[in-house]
């Protein structure tokens, strides 16, 4: 696998912590390009580009598309945790949007179960609490057409500044289908409170009600933030979100 926890400089110093950004399915690896290298004391690093609970995100070059990962949420969680443990990452937070946020939660649950270092904070963006998922993913039970998925991938690529080559679009469609399949098979156990605090972000034009985000309070010490914007604002206009993240930085250093 390609280098894990990709960052343009070194991994965090003693006075920093890693903010591990989990890519969303079908949104490409440009989705965090408008984020700076650091947000307050957080050192921004990227998890590998498989999209959310399953499937590869579309590449942003003209190279041939990667083969989608056919695994579901449990398999992606296990892979993610194995990388964190192998790399010895100890001071970090997780950020995920939509399905990637659900993966971030499951990773935090598994880290707690193993008794290894937990995230300093979990940032959940645009993702209903698991007990509300069925309401917001009902459309996942109606298989979308290729044209519908192609339209979504094209719109996303243009919005985040990608190059919608046919290979990229095809890979994005595969990623979205894999995520829908993962959501259809996802079975939420009883809420597991986390050791770490959570910050949930509701985008006002995203179509997700405040109660669905507030439902994350069943999973730990949670604060809900509401920001102007829509489903892709975390990637296209991240300034308000970055301020929220910076304001919730841990006290680091000696």
Image (cartoon, grey):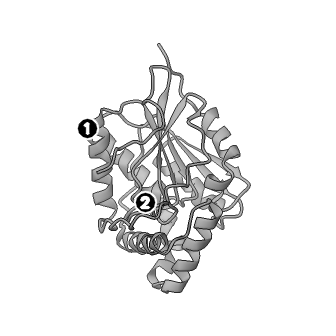
Q: Residue 86 carries which label?
A: 1
Residue 53 occupies which quadrant of the picture? bottom left
Q: Mark 2 highlights which residue?
A: 52
Residue 187 in percent (x, y) is at 35, 67
Q: Mark 1 and mark 2: span between their CA atoms?
A: 21 Å
Q: Are marks 1 and 2 in contact (CB under 8 Å)?
A: no
**Which residue is nearer to you in this view: 54 or 155?**
155
Q: What residue sits 53% from the left and 73% below the top?
A: 135
- Describe residue 225's horizontal placement relative to residue 110 as left or right: right
Residue 254 in percent (x, y) is at 47, 13
What is the number of callouts on the image? 2
Q: Which residue reaches farthest right?
A: 228
Disc 1 crowd rating (10 Å Cα; few below 14, some 14-19, many 20+) is: few
- Describe residue 187's horizontal placement relative to residue 126 as left or right: left
Disc 2 crowd rating (10 Å Cα; few below 14, some 14-19, many 20+) is: many
Residue 68 occupies which quadrant of the picture? bottom left
- Describe residue 29's horizontal placement relative to residue 33 as left or right: left
Circle 2 — which element? Answer: loop
Q: Which residue reaches farthest front?
A: 62
Circle 1 — which element? Answer: helix
Q: What residue sits 39% from the left and 67% below the top?
A: 65
Residue 110 in percent (x, y) is at 31, 47
Residue 180 in percent (x, y) is at 43, 73
Q: What residue sits 56% from the left and 65% below the top?
A: 163
**Which residue is nearer to you in this view: 173 or 199?**
173
Residue 166 in view = yes
């Amino acid at each position: 696998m390609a280098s894990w926890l990709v960052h343009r400089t070194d991994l965090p110093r003693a006075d920093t912590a890693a903010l591990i950004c989990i890519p969303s399915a079908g949104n490409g690896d440009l989705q965090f390009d408008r984020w700076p290298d650091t947000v307050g004391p957080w050192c921004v690093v990227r998890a590998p580009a498989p999209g959310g609970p399953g499937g590869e995100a579309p590449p942003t070059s003209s190279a041939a598309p990667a083969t989608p990962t056919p695994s579901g949420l449990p398999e992606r969680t296990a892979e993610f945790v194995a990388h964190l443990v192998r790399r010895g990452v100890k001071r970090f937070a997780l950020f995920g949007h939509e399905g990637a946020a659900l993966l971030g939660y499951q990773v935090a649950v598994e880290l707690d179960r193993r008794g290894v270092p937990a995230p300093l904070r979990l940032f959940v963006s645009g993702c209903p609490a698991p007990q509300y998922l069925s309401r917001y993913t009902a459309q996942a039970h109606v298989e979308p057409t290729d044209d519908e998925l192609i339209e979504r991938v094209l719109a996303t690529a243009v919005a985040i500044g990608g190059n919608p080559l046919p290979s990229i679009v095809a890979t994005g469609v595969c990623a979205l289908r894999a995520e829908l399949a993962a959501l259809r098979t996802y079975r939420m156990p009883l809420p597991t409170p986390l050791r770490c605090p959570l910050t949930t972000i509701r985008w006002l034009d995203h179509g997700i009600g405040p109660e669905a985000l507030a439902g994350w309070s069943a999973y730990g010490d949670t604060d809900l933030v509401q920001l102007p914007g829509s489903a892709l604002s975390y990637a296209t206009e991240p300034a308000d979100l970055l301020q929220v993240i910076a304001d919730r930085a841990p006290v680091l250093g000696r």
